[in-house]
Amino acid sequence: MIALDRLLAALLLSGATLATGLAHAQTPAPEPAAVLRTYSDIALATYEDALLGAKALKEATDALIVNPSQETLEKARTAWKASRPAYQQSEAFRFGNPVVDDWEGRVNAWPLDEGLIDYVDPAYGADSDTNSLYTANVVANRQITINGEAVDTSAITPELLRDKLQEAGDVEANVATGYHAIEFMLWGQDLNGTRPGAGNRPWTDYSRTECTNGNCDRRGEYLTAATELLVADLEEMVGDWREGGAARKHMTDDPAVGIPAILTGLGSLSYGELAGERMKLGLLLHDPEEEHDCFSDNTHVSHFNDVVGIRNVYEGRYKRVDGETIEGPSIAALIAAKDPAIDKEIHARIEDSLSKMGKIVAAAEGGEAYDQQIAEGNAAGNARVQAAIDALIAQTRAVERGVTTLGAQNVAIEGSDSLDNQGAVFQ
C-alpha cells in the first residue's frame, strides 16, 4: 500500500494522466456552489483590476487636458493600453449573466461611427443610409437633432453621453461611451487602412493656445466625461460582484443557473464573439474597420487577453495586477471528476489557442499590426489569423463536450454568420 501511494504521488508530480477510475477516486468533484463562489471571486478581482486601470487612465487624461503636450498624450495612450488586459479578461464573464450583458455595451461597444463624436477625414463620407448621426460631430456642435428632436449639446457631460448619445436613434454604431470612444479621442482615426500605422491625433487637438481642428476645449470636456463614465460603470460592476451584488447572486443562488452560465460564457466568447465577429468577419472582408481596437492598433493584445480570461475561468485561477492569485474549485475540476480525458482536451485546446494568439502578438510586436495581418494579399498574416480562429473553434468543440459530460442544460453558445453562414456576410 505504501509503495502504491508513492507511485501515485510520483505520477501526480510528473503530470502523468491516471486511469479514469483511479482519477475519480483521487479527485472528487467539488460542490457546484464552491465552483460558483470561485467564479464570482475571480470576477470581482478582475473587475477591481479593470477599475484600477480606468482610474489610472482618468488621471492620465486629466493631465493631458490640463497640460496638453506630446508627452502627456503619449502617457494617456499608454494608460489606455494598460487598462485593457484586465477588462478583456473580464469578458469571459459575459454571455451567461444578464447583469453583465445588459451593462457591457456601455464600456466596450464597437465598432463605432466616430463622426458622431468629433471631426473625421473627408474620405469617411458625409452621410449614411443607416445612421442620421453619422457625422453629427458633437464636439463641434452645440445642438444636434435625434429622431426629429433638437438636443442641447452645449454642455458635454456624462449624462449627455450616457442618456442622449449612446446608441442614439437606436443605432448600435452610435457609440458615445466606453473604451473605444476614449480610444478615438486619444488616437483619432487610423487612416492607414491595412498599411503600417495607427491613429495619429495631434496633441494640439487639446491645446487652448495652439488649437488644431477647432473646439479643443469641448474635446477636453468630451474626454473628461467619457473617462468619468468609464470609472463609474466599472465601479457599478465591482459592486455587482461583491457579496449580495446582483451579478454574484445570479450566479450563486442556483447552481442549475450558474453552471450553465459559466459554460455559455466560455463557449460564446470562444466561438461567436472572438472567433467569429472579432476575427473571421474582418478576415473575410479584409477590413481594418472590423478590427477591435482599430484606432490604436492594440487588437492583438485584446484578443490574446480574451483567451487568458477563458483560461482563468476554466481553471478557477486569476493572477491580479498586484501579483495576488485568486483560486479555488473550478469548472475544470467538475469536468475532470466526470471525465479526465475531456478536461485534458479542454486544457490542451485553450493552451493551443493561446499559442496561436501568441504568434499574432509576436508579429504585431515585430511591426506587423493586426490590421496588416488581415489585409488582402497577406497570405502569411491571413494564415496566422485563421490558425487562431481554427484553434478557437476546436476549443469551443471541446467545451461543448464538457457540457455533455456534465449533462448541463440550457447552455446556449452564440454563433456568428462569419462562421456559420458566410453568404450572409456578403449580402
Image (cartoon, grey):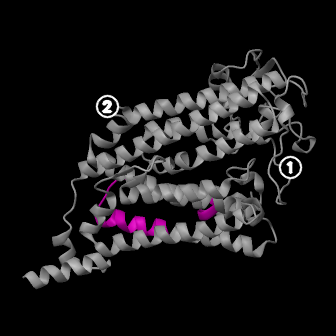
User: Residue 244 got which mark?
Assistant: 2
Image spot of residue 115 (x, y percent): 81, 35
Q: Secondary structure at mark 2?
A: loop
Quadrant of image for the C terminus: bottom right
Query: Which region is colored magenta?
Result: 395-420
Magenta part mainly helix, strand or loop?
A: helix
CA gap between label 1 and label 2 equals 47 Å
Query: Toward the viewer: 188 or 407?
Result: 188
Q: Is residue 380 magenta?
A: no
**Residue 158 tag number:** none
Which quarter of the figure has residue 178?
top right
- Residue 294 location in percent, x, y? 73, 50
Q: Residues within 10 Å of mark 2 (few under 14, many from 20)?
A: few
Residue at the spot x=50%, y=58% of the render? 308
* Mark earlier in primary sequence (1, 2): 1
The dot on residue 191 is 1
Examine the rendered structure and indicate whether residue 265 appears above or below residue 423: above
Residue 172, compared with residue 377, is above or below; it is above
